[in-house]
Image (spheres, helix red, strand yellow):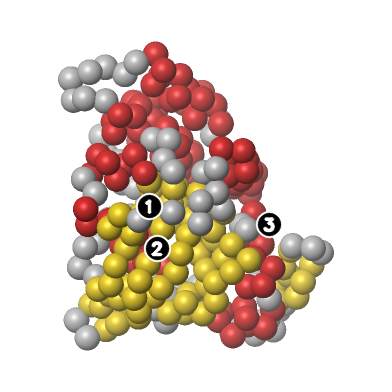
Amino acid sequence: MILLKNVGFQYGNRKILKNISLSVQKGSFYGVIGPNGAGKTTLMNIITGLRSDFTGRVYIKNKSITEYKIKELARQISVVPQQMDIRFPYTCLEIVMMGRTPYKSRLRALSRRDMGIVRRCMEMTDTIRFADCLITELSGGEKQRVILAKALAQQPEVLFLDEAFSHMDIYYSVKCLNVLKQLVDEDGLTVVCIMHDLNLVSSFCSEVVMLQNGEVVRQGRTETVMKPELIHGTFKIKVAKAGNSGLAVLPEL
């Protein structure tokens, strides 16, 4: 689905990303992890077309990202950013309806099929009860679920999430991750998710990309990357295995 070749990026003389090459396969759930400043968000912004001032090449379905028109790219990928500052008092239904924009002409109203997709995505994220509420009146976690519903309504082939669960309580974090995993397993959706919660990464991701200082430390199956020695070397914390997929952070550094 996605191929990166020698991708680099820098602010002035400060190198943020250093010759990153990696691939993302269709129908997999990727976790992107690394300490603050590792370059995770910058990397995602490059892959999703939000930054063009980088070196190297990015391909989506064997086509350079620079060759995609905005509407065409929006049919391939959707993004749930770390924060989304919405100041206009749209209803939550209106926000999710925006996810269908790549599929309609400017003057055409949404079809019955479009509205069915919107409703299904709101039901999956438990936001249908907010349909008539203003997005500006919701809590941070509720807003994130509405934005997730909007991203799913785009029906992308690849969904990118940048700390998309940071304001959700543990119940909705797990609920939304279960929804995404089901879409990966049953519909072939590809998910690329930046997360700090290593337990959630271990539990839901099939592949992990570990970054440190702008470089890929390790990429591969979750069980081969989420090892205590690798985590200690990257995050400077000690962890121990807790069951088949869980991790327990030890009190000493």
Q: CA distance from mark 3 to mark 2?
A: 25 Å
> Circle 2 sits on which residue?
3
- Residue 245: % across, % down: 74, 62
Residue at image coords 44%, 43%: 157
> Circle 1 sits on which residue?
61
Task: Please state which of residues 30 and 6 is positioned toward the viewer in this rendering.
Answer: 6
Which amino acid, mark 3? Ser
- Residue 206: % across, % down: 63, 58
Figure check: 90 above or below 208: above
Which amino acid, mark 1? Lys
Figure check: 246 above or below 140: below
> Circle 3 sits on which residue?
203
Q: Which mark is residue 29?
A: none
- In the displayed structure image, the side of residue 45 where residue 204 appears, left or right: right
Q: Secondary structure at mark 3?
A: helix
Q: CA distance from mark 1 to mark 2?
A: 8 Å
Q: CA distance from mark 1 to mark 3?
A: 28 Å
Which amino acid, mark 2? Leu
The residue mark sitting in front, 1 or 3, is 1
The quadrant holding residue 29 is bottom right
- Residue 128: % across, % down: 50, 24
Task: Please state which of residues 65 and 168 is positioned toward the viewer in this rendering.
Answer: 65
